[in-house]
Image (tube, grey):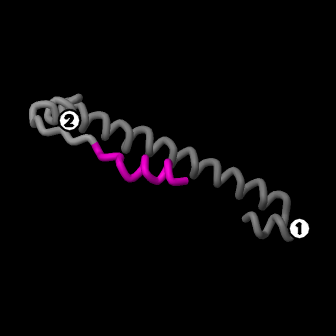
Amino acid sequence: MYAISTALSTYTEPVVHDSRKLSMATDLISDSLRQTLQWIVYCVIGQSIVVFGIAANIVNIVCFVRQGFREPINVSLL
C-alpha cells in the first residue's frame, strides 16, 4: 500500500508552456468544418434516432393494445 500511495502522490500533470504547441493541438479542424459536423450529428443523426425511437414506441403500443389488458404485465409495460 505504501508504494502505491507514494507513486500516486508523486505524479504531476504535464504542463505545456509553449503557446504555439497548444494552439496547434486545438486547431485540428477548422471552425466551419466543426460547425458542419455538429449540424450533421445533432440534426441529421440525432433526429434520425429520435424518429426511429418514436416509431418503435408506436409499434410497441399497438402490439400491447392488440394483446389486451388481461395480463397485468401488459398494463405495466404500456
Q: Position of residue 24 (x, y in %)?
A: 16, 29
The residue under label 2 is which amino acid type? Thr
Question: In front: 62, or 1?
Answer: 1
Quick one: SS at disc 1?
loop
The residue under label 1 is which amino acid type? Glu
Question: In percent of the image, x 26 and y 41: which residue is there?
Answer: 14
How packed mark 1 is, by other alpha carbons closer than 10 Å (few <14, some 14-19, many 20 or more), is few
Spot the residue most to the right. Answer: 70
Question: In front: 77, or 67?
Answer: 77
Q: Position of residue 28 (x, y in %)?
A: 23, 29
The residue to which callout 1 is attached is 71
Quadrant position of the C terminus in the picture? bottom right
Question: In percent of the image, x 18 and y 38: which residue is there?
Answer: 16
Spot the residue most to the front. Answer: 2
Tell me whether circle 2 and circle 1 mark residues in contact (CB < 8 Å).
Answer: no
In the rendered structure, which segment of residues is drawn in magenta? 1-13
Question: In percent of the image, x 49 and y 48: which residue is there?
Answer: 3
Q: Position of residue 46 (x, y in %)?
A: 44, 44
Asked if residue 51 is positioned above or below residue 33 in the image, the reply reads: below
Considering only order in the chain, which callout, 1 or 2, is on the residue closer to the N terminus?
2
Magenta stretch containing residue 5, yes or no? yes
Question: In percent of the image, x 35 and y 36: which residue is there?
Answer: 40
How packed mark 2 is, by other alpha carbons closer than 10 Å (few <14, some 14-19, many 20 or more), is few
Gap in Å between the C-alphas at discs 2 and 1? 58 Å
The numbered mark at residue 26 is 2
Q: In front: mark 2 or mark 1?
A: 2
Along the horizontal axis of the image, is 29 left or right of 52?
A: left
Q: Position of residue 4 (x, y in %)?
A: 50, 49
